[in-house]
Image (spheres, grey):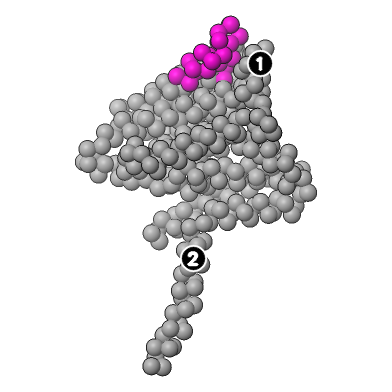
Amino acid sequence: MGMNLNTEVMEKPKQSQFQIGTILKKYNLFIIFVAFFIIGTLLSEHFLTVQNILNILQQSAFVGIIAIGMTFVILVGGIDLSVGAVLALSGMLAALMMSSGLNPFLAIAITILAGAFMGFVSGFISTKFKVPAFIATLAMMVSARGFALLTTDGEPIYDLPPAFTALGESMGNIPIPAIIWIVLTIIAVVILKYTTFGRKLYAVGGNEESARLSGIAVEKYITSTYILAGIMSSIAGILMAAWLTVGQPTAGTGLELDAIAAVVIGGTSLAGGRGGIGGTFIGVLIMSMIVNIFNLLGLSSYYQSIFMGVIIVIALVMNQLISNKK
């Protein structure tokens, strides 16, 4: 009888430790988000203001929309380095068409189709010719950036119609790009969690050969993720041009790295098959909060880059540890 009591006493701390460990593993991203929110509140009186929160949402929107497409690509074990350049080219195409007198809605539709086509080309080259995604999308990045600069010989396009620039303004107090980002995030969550398409993407990312043997058209599904990434990049490019009220050929430089970082911080595995849009959404907000805190404190962007690198490494290590334990 005494042995049973001792055993129960010994098991309680272990059970408690197990529960704490499980909670930390399951909600680590949310805990990090709350921690930075508290840090920002304590370090600056301007952090927890309506205007600053809206600024964070505005700054997050463009990376956030691109990161949605990047999540789909990384879930199947791919990578897309072209998203920042596709954003720039999309903004330039939309601005160029509207400056030539084309209806803004038609210009937007054509631009999104162009983004989808660029994504298709990257995916097709990668899957059909077995070119590593890194190389295929790097080539697209260089080409798209070149075309963006070539359209006006590197000069911005001004005088965009008010019907278009209104997309970069606010609805009430909330920035329209942020609203669109949130809506697209919800749609993406539904697609990944509740559709056959989403389940097959996880299957392809988890084990490509097994997915192929199960009858899944692997190449088609992989290519579709690059098409989605192209569409998201073109939407982000359109919204950025509307927000800046100018078509800027140098826009989006480095955003591909920010998007990848947000996806990684959000818990999506670079090996594919594990992760999701919800984590990416929080990952984007964490990155934006860090930048915002540094800006409010007046610290150099050099410190921001160093700190962001450390955060990405920590996120990768944590994801790997969780993956190994599973």
The residue carrying pointer 1 sits among few (fewer than 14), some (14 to 19) or many (20 or more) residues within 10 Å by Cα, namely few
For this view, does 159 lie left or right of residue 256? Answer: right
Disc on the earlier residue, 2 or 1:
2
x then y, percent, for residue 220: 31, 30
Residue 143 visible in the displayed image = no
Q: Amino acid at mark 1?
A: Pro
Question: Which residue occupies 48% across, 15% down?
Answer: 110
Question: Is residue 52 found inside the magenta-colored segment of the image?
Answer: no
Q: Does 273 appear above or below 244?
A: below
Question: Which residue occupies 51% across, 13% down?
Answer: 106
* Main SS of residues in magenta: helix
Q: Secondary structure at mark 1?
A: helix
For this view, does 202 lie left or right of residue 24? Answer: left
Question: Which residue occupies 41% across, 85% down?
Answer: 7
Q: Which residue is mark 2?
A: 21
Q: Which residue is mark 1?
A: 162
Q: What range is drawn magenta here?
A: 91-113
Q: Does 85 appear above or below 211?
A: above
Give the quarter of the image for residue 1.
bottom left
